[in-house]
Image (cartoon, rainbow, N blue to C red):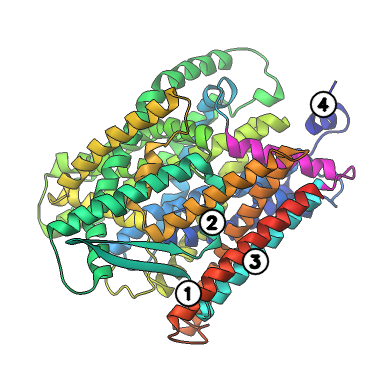
Amino acid sequence: MNQSPADLGRAGAPTAELTLRGILLGGVITLLFTAANVYLGLKIGLTFATSIPAAVISMAVLRAVRGASILENNIVQTVASAAGTLAAIIFVLPGLVMIGYWQGFPFFTTAAITATGGILGVMFSVPLRRALVVDTPLPYPEGRAAAEVLKVGEESRSGSSESARGLAAILGSTLASAAFAILTQTRLIAAEAATFFRVGAGATGVTGGLSFALLGAGHLIGLSAGMAILLGVAVGWWLVLPILTAMAPQAGDVAAWANGVFRTDVRFFGAGVIGVAAIWTLIRIAAPVAAGLRASLGVARGADMAVEEQDLPFWVVAAGTLATLVPIALLLHSVIGGGPLAGSEWLLIVGSLLFVLVVGLVIAAVCGYMAGLIGASNSPVSGIGILSVLAAAAMLAGWFGRGGATDETAALVAYALIVTGIVFGIATISNDNLQDLKTGQLVGATPWKQQVALVIGVCFGSLVVPPVMQLLYTSFGFAGMPGAGPNALAAPQAALISALAQGVLGGDLNWTMIGWGAAAGGVFVLLDEALGRAGRLRLPPLGVGLGIYLPMSATLTVVIGALIGHFYDGWAERTADAEASKRLGVLTATGMIVGESLWNVVFAGIVYESGTDSPLALVSGHEQTALIAGTLLFAAVTWGLYRRTRRLAVG
């Protein structure tokens, strides 16, 4: 009979699982990867899942340690996975700087928002494990991939060479990605290719980032999501934008004209698409989640359970939830503090706590389902954030009205963003936690130990998010905030979410474009369902919405990465060990993201210390030469990395 490594460990000596060294190693990886993800998310609106690279690093460090096991490596990746999730708080909190409410990121307030939302995310996802992980056909692509990586690491102890090849793949692409990013900072090669042009009376353009982080993200999201994003790009940039610009022709700089219309109109069209797509997702999963919860409660009333089925007890979940509401209430009270909203503390705090509980539970189920369907990296939690801020702002508008005094409206917008930040923490952690629990199920781990490990990871990540965000704010700033420079980070989701809150509470939301986007979202939902019934490649409507409201410089390279990943996987299917070959492709793509992201965090520190936003520039001008050189080098390095990966796969 075949036994997993965990089974073999339990059959003999006790197997190490939730250990101090595993927690500390996971904490160190969390600190590094959280910093990388904060930068990536603020630049392009995307973050990467850290479970797989964390598992690889854990195996490399612990393989020489006596008594280390697959279960201990699983705890390391569980702790570190908080880096790929908590960093998504940057989709909300920079909005407080953009609207001028914050002048920086206060450490304790930022950490409290991040930690309380994250801990509630763990608590809310515990009762969902049986519903969405055990009794479900959901694939959990990243959870399964992480389990395979862990198994490879365990096999390497008995002489397997696959673990060494995986480590070689991720290190090679990490170094190449970082080196290319360094070259772009010298200005010897370009970091982006862009051209804008007139189309009749209107305008549009084509832009693409020469970024290995974007390319790697495209490989990981897959062809279906990539083609959905491409459809969004085509609709937003090559259909809606030319129509809107033609309705208000301008002379002068075409790029400034087109980008201005994109920011003020097209992104709200995309928000409408995302809103409808998210509501449709809620409707689709309501029945299976309810059935799974009933099954979970039935098991909880049973007697003895196997180790692999032991979640945190219900009383711990309930007590943890109630205990976390106390610091949230204190946090919200401090925000209201003597300002324009003073006198309404009890109404605001009690209403907000109920909002966090009810909306948080629903969002935990939605995000867990989406992660199981398309993976934690691909799950569009930013779309859920849009719905959350609209609901929070609408709740406040119902109490205080719209279009009030300027200081009161600004305070309400800030309050809505802070409440949304807490709910967003719930969304991101539940999005990730169930993926980790799937990995644990496949390697024979103990669920409650993983749930404890993720709480610890939340605490680690909450400590690093505030200083990294402060560093990037000081070094670059954010587009749209007062005094933002030309190299300001885009923070696209934060800009959109803060604009939505301002629009709802200020009474001037661009409802026309949101309405048209909602109508288009209904069409995209019908299209996706029709493709599914026909057995064709599906185009997730949430992906279409993402393609519409993100800058094309971020999305077009992601689409190219999705195509490359598709063709690589097609080649891998023809090899002797298709799954192992695909895993090497995943590790190569992950390294692309890690290398550029980590370098850019270092670069942010260099900018901060030097006082200039281009401290490594060696030349100025020569844009055309830099563009040609950058494009050719980018293509050559991409070809070289995948050629090397194919050699590793067949070697």
- Residue 323 circle label: none
Q: Which residue is mark 1?
A: 627
Q: Nearer the viewer, residue 567 or 311?
A: 567
- If you read the primary sequence from the N terminus, does the residue marked by circle 1 or circle 3 appear first? 3
Cα separation between marks 2 and 3: 13 Å
Amino acid type at mark 1:
Leu
Q: Position of residue 346 (x, y in %)?
A: 24, 41
Amino acid type at mark 2:
Leu
Q: Position of residue 546 (x, y in %)?
A: 37, 47
| Residue at the image point whose x is 69% and y is 26% from the top | 308
Crowdedness of circle 4 by 10 Å Cα count: few (<14), some, many (20+)? few
| Residue at the image point whose x is 84% and y is 45% from the top | 156
Q: Which residue is mark 4?
A: 3
Cα separation between marks 1 and 3: 19 Å
Tell me the SS state at disc 4.
loop
- Image: magenta residue range: 140-161
Instruction: Tell me: residue 579, above or below residue 52.
Output: above
Tell me the SS state at disc 3.
helix
Q: Position of residue 257 (x, y in %)?
A: 22, 67
Q: Which residue is mark 2?
A: 215
Amino acid type at mark 3:
Ala
- If you read the primary sequence from the N terminus, does the residue marked by circle 4 or circle 2 appear first? 4
Q: Is residue 596 left or right of residue 347?
A: right
